[in-house]
Image: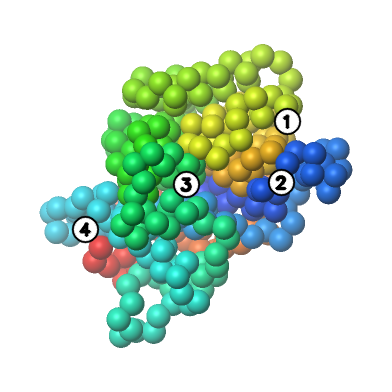
Amino acid sequence: MKPDRVRGCLIGGAVGDALGAPVEFDSLSRIRAAYGPGGITDLTDGLVTDDTQMTLFTVEGLIRGSVRGRERGQGHVPSTVRHAYLRWLDTQDHQGPPVPGDVLHRTGWLREQTWLYARRAPGNACLSGLRGHVAPNSKGCGSVMRSAPFGLGPWPAGQAYEWAAECSHFTHGHPTAAASSGALAAIVHHLVNDTTLDDAVAAALKLVDDPATAGALRAAVDLAHGGPPSAEKVESLGEAWVAEEALAIGVYCALAGGSFTEALVLAANHSGDSDSTAAICGNLLGAEGVRIPAGWIDRVEGRDTIERLAADFVDEMTRGGAPRDRYPGH
């Protein structure tokens, strides 16, 4: 396991999220009118959204699943991830962490990071699904944007795919959401093991049995190899409000961009879910080992928390050494 790839995947996703967040609901013409012909090209306030928040709770759930399995001889990762998502839900429902002894108190240091108590347009499917109301036809991108961490562990790509797909069903009932979540996790798995992005996508496609997800990925790869990148080409893949479109745009931009900065700018500037596509693109490039500009890392919200979580993940997965006081119980 390469610690820099784990850190890069998580930091890269957060940077992309922060870059795209200010223009998430704007049309391309409105973005260009506000920021110039090149669109948004730099972080504004560095604030992240539910995309990064839920991604971090995915990591926490994976760590807890490993700790539980190591200490108790049993552990069901999807169960620990679901409990982690319920802790995220608390950050959306309350103004701050509960005091010890509060009936709502759920243990864990991530749950107690005050900066996470911010509503940044969380997806309705994520909120309602975690409250027990999963729509069978929901296939928004809310399960894809949180699924990159499943690919960071020492387990096989197939396991990463299965866990991400299963955990997608906590909030999104449509099989395309599950397949797109699984595909992202599998691609990340291959990237952190030194596979090129082209080859990582090809390998992940062998696991995908959903026509919409497979078609979107193939379209993204073909488009990336079909000439210079553009915002108009991004928009030809969709608006990214649904799972397979968000995945396709993230993959296209990561393939077509000449650098981390160019790829993320491409991923953020379109008439759709800009923060999710830029977050996915950042996850991919960080997992691939592409250098992230230090100035962006320094300015992204929650950097210290992200880096601590990445270090704990590596410690647990390589030495079984995640701090027990930070990852108790579920």
Q: Secondary structure at mark 1?
A: helix
Count neighbours of disc 1 (C-alpha within 10 A) and say few if under 14, some if 14 to 19, many if 20 or more: some
Question: Residue 227, percent across and down?
Answer: 71, 15
Front one among 12 and 58: 58
Q: Secondary structure at mark 2?
A: loop
Marks 3 and 2, how far apart in space? 18 Å
Q: Secondary structure at mark 3?
A: loop
Question: Residue 234, percent across and down?
Answer: 66, 29
Marks 1 and 4, how far apart in space? 45 Å
Q: Tell me which numbered mark, 3 or 1, is placed earlier along the sequence.
A: 3
The residue at the point 62 percent across, 18 percent down is 223
Judged left or right of residue 37, residue 122 is left
From the viewer's perspective, is the residue at label 2 or at label 1 nearer?
A: 2
Query: For the C terminus, which image quadrant?
Result: bottom left
97 above or below 52? below
Question: Residue 114, percent across and down?
Answer: 51, 73
The residue at the point 36 percent across, 46 percent down is 135
- The residue carrying mark 4 is 68
Cβ atoms at labels 1 and 4 below 8 Å apart: no
- The residue carrying mark 3 is 142
Marking on residue 26: 2
Q: Tell me which numbered mark, 2 or 1, is placed earlier along the sequence.
A: 2
